[in-house]
Structure formats: C-alpha cells, structure tokens
Amino acid sequence: MGLRLLTTTLAFLPTTLSGLASAASCTNFAAPTLPGAEVLWVKSNPVADFSLPSDQTRLPEDAPKADFCNVSVALTHPGDNDTVFVTVWLPHEKSWNGRYTATGGGGLAAGYDINMLQPLLSSFATSSTDGGLTLNHTINPQSGIWGTKHDGAVNEALLLNLAHRSIHDMSVVSKQIIKQFYKTDPTYSYWLGCSQGGRQGYAAAAHYPDDFNGVLAMAPALSSEYIGPGDFWPVIVMENEGEIVPTCVFEAFQAAIVELCDPLDGVTDGMISDYDLLLTCPFDPKSIVGDTIDCEETGAITISQHHATIVSKILEGPHNDYGERLWYGLAHGATFSGVANTTLDNDILTPQPFPPSAGWLRGMIIRNTSYNIFDMTIPEYLDAFNTSIEQGGPIFGLDTLDLTSFHSFGGKLLTWVGLADEYIHPSNLLKYYHSVEEKLNNTTTNINDFYRIFTAPGVGHCHGGVGPQPLNAMTALVDWVENGIAPETLPVQSNTVNGKVALRDLCLYPKKPVYNEGDDNSQRSFSCKDPRKEEQGKDESGDGDEESGAKGLFGGGSWCAVGFGLVCLGFLSV
Ligand SMILES: *[C@@H]1O[C@H](CO)[C@@H](O)[C@H](O)[C@H]1NC(C)=O
Ligand SMILES: *[C@@H]1O[C@H](CO)[C@@H](O)[C@H](O)[C@H]1NC(C)=O
Ligand SMILES: *[C@@H]1O[C@H](CO)[C@@H](O)[C@H](O)[C@H]1NC(C)=O
Ligand SMILES: *[C@@H]1O[C@H](CO)[C@@H](O)[C@H](O)[C@H]1NC(C)=O
Ligand SMILES: *[C@@H]1O[C@H](CO)[C@@H](O)[C@H](O)[C@H]1NC(C)=O
Ligand SMILES: *[C@@H]1O[C@H](CO)[C@@H](O)[C@H](O)[C@H]1NC(C)=O
Ligand SMILES: *[C@@H]1O[C@H](CO)[C@@H](O)[C@H](O)[C@H]1NC(C)=O
Ligand SMILES: *[C@@H]1O[C@H](CO)[C@@H](O)[C@H](O)[C@H]1NC(C)=O
Ligand SMILES: [Ca+2]
C-alpha cells in the first residue's frame, strides 16, 4: 500500500519545478528571525536511506527509504528559560511537491520527529517541534515534569508553548528554512495532527489564522483542562471503591454495551454508528450482574454488583458536589482498556493510568513529588479538577478557539473522530461544532464552507477499533483547499467486522449513516442522512463505488496514524 501511495503522489508534483534556480544545498542556513524569540543555533545535515522500524511508523516493511535535508533550529523566549527545538525535513528539490505540512504531537508532547516521516515520503516539506517540553532532551514530556518549575510553580511558559506558541514558532521558522532551501515559498501550508496534535490544529486555526491554508485535525483533544483529570477518573473510581477490576470483566461490559446499542442505529454490524447513542445508549450495568465469564488470566469470574457500580461511575464520568457532571465518562461502545487499564502481576491487580493523564495531574496540578496520586480521595480529586479548569481553561478552553479570522483568510478545517474513541468522548467536539454553528447562525456563512467533521463508527482514538479506518483525509483536505472541492464523505479502509470486510464512507456531521437494505458490509446499503432535516432526501452517498475506500493518493491507512506506535499510545489528550 505504501508503495502505491508513494508512486501516486507524483500527481501532486507542481509543474513549475523545472523553472527553479540553483540546486538546493543542505548547508549554511541563516538563522531565521522570529519576533519574541531568540534563535540559538541552526544545524543541518543531509540524510540518506533513512527508515524507522515499521512497528513505530505503521508504514509497510518495504516502504522506501528517505533522502532529505535535516534542519534543526534551537530557540528560546527571553525571560522564559525555555529551549525549543524545531526540526524541518526537506525532500530533495526534485521530489518536493511544493507544499509544507507541520505535524503535531500526542499526549503531553508537542511533537515527534517520527510524525514527519509519512509526509516526507509523500513529498511534503515537513516539520515538528518539541515545544521546549523535553527540557533540552532530558525528559519524556509525557511525564508532565516540565509542568513544574524549580520553585514549584506552574511553568506557564511551557504551558503556553504547548497551548499554541510553539505552533507559530514552528511555522514561522519552517517557512523561512523552506524558502532558503528551495528559493521559493511553499505553495500551500498545512497542519497535520491527531489528539493533542488535533487540538494543536484547532489552536493554530484560532490563534494563527493565516499560518496554514488547511488544517487536518483528527480526534482533537479539545478542553485539555478537562481531559487531563477526566481520563484519570476510572483510576480514582477503582481506588476509592477499593476494587481493581480485571480487564476481562471490563471486556464483558463493553461487549454487553455493544450488543445492546449496536442494533439501535438500524443495523447489527458490531458498531454503534449513531453519535447520539454514545451518550444515550440505555445500558444498565446491573443487567449483567451474575453472569459468569471465562477469564484467561484469573479463571472464571462472576460479574458482581460492585463491578456494575464501578462501571456505572466510569460511564457517567466525574460529578461535582452538586451532582453536576464535570466531564464525560467513557463513550458507550469504546474499550475500557485505555483509561481503565489494569494489569495482573503476581495475583495483584494494578490500575495503569493513562500516562499523560497522570503526568498532567502530577506535573501541572499537584506539583508535589511526594504525593501519591493513587491515594487521592474523591474530594481531593475534585479539588484537582477545579485547579485544572481554573489554570488550564484560559489557554485550553473551548472559548479560546474562535475560528472567525481563519475563515476570513480562507482556511479549511477538516476533522474526523472515531465514535469508539476510548480517551476523549466525541460529544465534546460536537458541542464545540455547535457553538461555531450558533455563532454563524445569523450570517450568510455556512459552517461547512470552512469547517467539516466526519464521524467514524467503531473507530478508536486516532486509529484502531473494529470500524473501518479512515483513509486519505489529507488528500481530501488538499483537494478542498487547492481545488475548492469540499469533501461530502471520507473514504475508509476496509476492515473486518465479525469476520467480514466492511466498507463504508464516513458521513459529514451531523449526517448519520442510515442502513437502507442489502449486505450490511456494502457501501451501497447505507446512505448519510441529516437527522435535523425533516424532509430526508434520497441517498446522498449510498451509491458510492465499493472500491472507493481503497483509492486515493496516499493510500495505506490513516495518515496521521503514523508514529502512533509512539505518539498515539503516549497520548493523546491534553
Ligand atoms: C537531525 O539533526 C538533529 C540535530 O543535529 C539530530 O539530533 C538528529 O539526529 C538529526 N536527524 C537525522 C535523521 O539525521
Ligand atoms: C532553567 O531551566 C533549566 C532546565 O529546565 C533549569 O535547570 C534551570 O534551573 C532553570 N533556571 C531558572 C532560573 O529557572
Ligand atoms: C542542551 O544540552 C546540551 C548538552 O548538555 C548543551 O550542550 C546545549 O548547550 C544545551 N542547549 C541547547 C540550546 O542546545
Ligand atoms: C496497559 O498497561 C500495560 C502496563 O503498563 C501496558 O503495557 C499496556 O500497553 C496498557 N494497555 C493500553 C491499552 O494502554
Ligand atoms: C506533598 O505531599 C505530601 C504527601 O501527601 C504532604 O505530606 C505534603 O504536605 C505535600 N506538600 C505540599 C507543599 O503540599
Ligand atoms: C473552584 O473552587 C472555587 C472555590 O470553591 C470556586 O469558587 C470555583 O467556582 C471553582 N471553579 C470551578 C471551575 O469549578
Ligand atoms: C438559529 O436561529 C434560529 C432562529 O433564528 C433557531 O431556530 C435555530 O435553532 C438556530 N440554530 C442554531 C444552530 O443556533
Ligand atoms: C439570531 O437571530 C435570532 C432572531 O433574530 C435571535 O433570536 C438570535 O439570538 C440570533 N442569534 C445569534 C447567535 O445572534
Ligand atoms: Ca450498528
């Protein structure tokens, strides 16, 4: 797949390349200029035959090796005591497609070099930045250690870097490096990221509306100030209920949820395809109390009332003292294995918190190395939640994400979200979308002129899950930005559900996939319909070619899934 992808990307080559002047040289880059920052050094080296292990990149074993110019820039914001690295990878002049894409991070990381590999192999000039969060390559940013300064205070400068400052630093620096190398500006600039990287894409659009022509922001970790503590909630529940639940018990609950709510979207196909059901699925955890399940690790277990109580709380999410919900629980149908991961070792069950979530609490909120977050009582947790909202809200909150200028500049924002996202309840994104829509209500602008969300049934956070995996979203974005062809659907990669291949286009929100008739694995059996329109038109996308999911310029899986061996796992929200 990767090879087809690479050969077909030739279609992207601009026709003007032959007109370029002298051959690009990978030496002697001048220091870029950046208001508010001081560039410390620029280093560059040509790289040949570069590859990374395919379990890290998710590229095929036989993916081509990369030749490129590697440019690193170190900078600091005077007074802020930070060291920020920006890395730019430049394909050879002859194979450059004329475009630039910045790449985002995951979890508590602002970016990883590995995320540049697929854009590079697809002929983009590309960049990433650590945002200063590695403290000059001395720590893993997922630890959250960067959140605390030596005096114990919150490191506001690094928090700002993550929130949005490092995005602009990177784009300004990268564009100057690109210009020096190719002697011309990029024709178009893009953002590419999932999870934290998706949130960064929204922040880029809101804060730096003319930095990127197109933003591909998948499963964005919007409202990080809630996700940070929110993803720790299942651990708090288990610790405070005094019982750590084995994985197989959670799996039994997940299976029961899917069994009940999968058919409620109109077809029993192993996935919950109606986004409303993520909140309204009428599953009662008590319904499987007494069932006995066969657990590989522990032997047979009978589901108890107490298991049901714990699962109820995980699904309901944290509530404050007044009974108001602070944050969503786990989306119905998503796996518990992300935020309610437990492991059995020497007969002892231990909760394994989602690392960035623990890092957020330790580094940004508690900031006390002798405090054990596993011992947090519910009141202490609610206090921490409060601190997180008060501290993070002003820079990570939904109301910091005004897209008005981005729209005026002609920018396009494309998002897809897995409806089985196990780290971030998709409803928060849909809520944000409605707030944008509401602001435009009395204007002549249609939200879909510049902002489109697609929902991916059965797909987990950025990738994974039983649902067909989104594909070619970057191609769709490029087509939208450069040719004015707005995507009505997004293709998905075939996957197997219950042993069968499932092909289906993703619906443009708020449309939902509606089953008409025929083989439930066939694209022709579904159409996308808007539940808000009384007069439902005929099939709007149900007549697609069965093969549509496999075509396209990039092929081979979700673009941004590259590097998630490291990045996705390492997080994601916040
Ligand atoms: C790119 O340059 C940086 C800074 O010199 C270096 O640390 C890194 O290893 C280089 N990457 C590659 C792939 O050569
Ligand atoms: C600046 O940051 C470095 C690295 O994190 C740290 O060791 C040093 O103490 C900091 N200096 C001040 C003045 O905070
Ligand atoms: C980062 O650490 C290295 C190795 O300790 C040091 O030589 C360098 O000066 C530091 N700062 C920068 C911006 O590279
Ligand atoms: C669960 O925790 C174990 C131990 O830390 C880890 O190896 C595994 O990857 C985690 N599973 C998930 C889905 O995060
Ligand atoms: C840090 O946590 C420890 C252990 O819970 C506690 O005894 C101590 O008072 C805390 N320190 C601060 C400054 O809150
Ligand atoms: C945090 O707690 C303070 C004091 O109880 C309260 O005034 C404030 O409204 C709370 N903030 C949030 C975001 O709940
Ligand atoms: C837009 O305004 C109309 C009335 O002017 C109202 O009925 C509709 O619900 C509003 N839509 C949104 C998305 O706010
Ligand atoms: C849009 O117009 C309607 C009717 O004039 C008004 O009720 C509503 O508040 C307006 N909405 C916004 C977001 O301005
Ligand atoms: Ca279904």
Image (cartoon, helix red, strand yellow):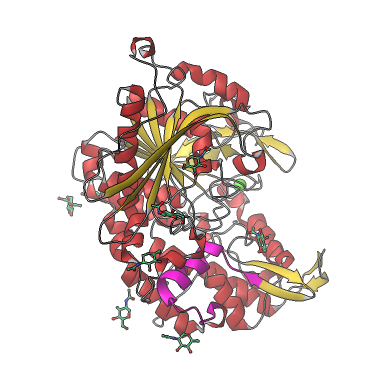
Question: Could you say which quadrant of the image residue 163 lies in?
Answer: bottom left
Q: In this image, 153 relative to 272: left or right? A: left
Residue at horizontal 43%, vertical 46%? 104
Q: Position of residue 261 (x, y in %)?
A: 60, 55
Q: Which image quadrant is residue 132 in?
A: bottom left
Q: Which of 135 and 58 lies nearest the eye of the viewer? A: 135
Instruction: Tell me which segment is drawn in magenta.
Output: 351-373
**For residue 358: magenta?**
yes
Report the number of discs: 0
Locate the C terminus and report the quarter of the image it occupies.
bottom left
- Is 270 or 414 nearer to us in this picture? 414
Left or right relative to 61: residue 476? left
Determine the residue positioned at 35% across, 30% down: 178
Which image quarter is the N terminus in? top right
Where is residue 361? Give x, y as percent.
46, 71
Residue at the image point whose x is 34% and y is 32% from the top: 29
In the image, residue 369 lies in the stretch drawn in magenta: yes
Viewer can see residue 313: yes
Image coords of residue 425 (percent x, y): 48, 58
Residue found at the far right of this picture:
299
Instruction: Name the one closer to the observer, 57 or 546.
Output: 57
Judged from the image, the quadrant occupied by ligand 2 is: bottom left
Q: Is the residue 423 above or below the residue 319 in the image?
A: above
Residue drawn at x 31%, y 22% is 183
**Is residue 279 among what the camera can see?**
no
Q: From the viewer's perspective, is residue 262 above or below residue 316?
A: above
Q: Please tell me whether residue 12 is drawn above or below residue 439 in the rendered image.
A: above
Tell me: 400 left or right of 64: left
The spot of residue 573 in percent (x, y) is: 47, 57
To which quarter of the image does residue 469 belong? top right
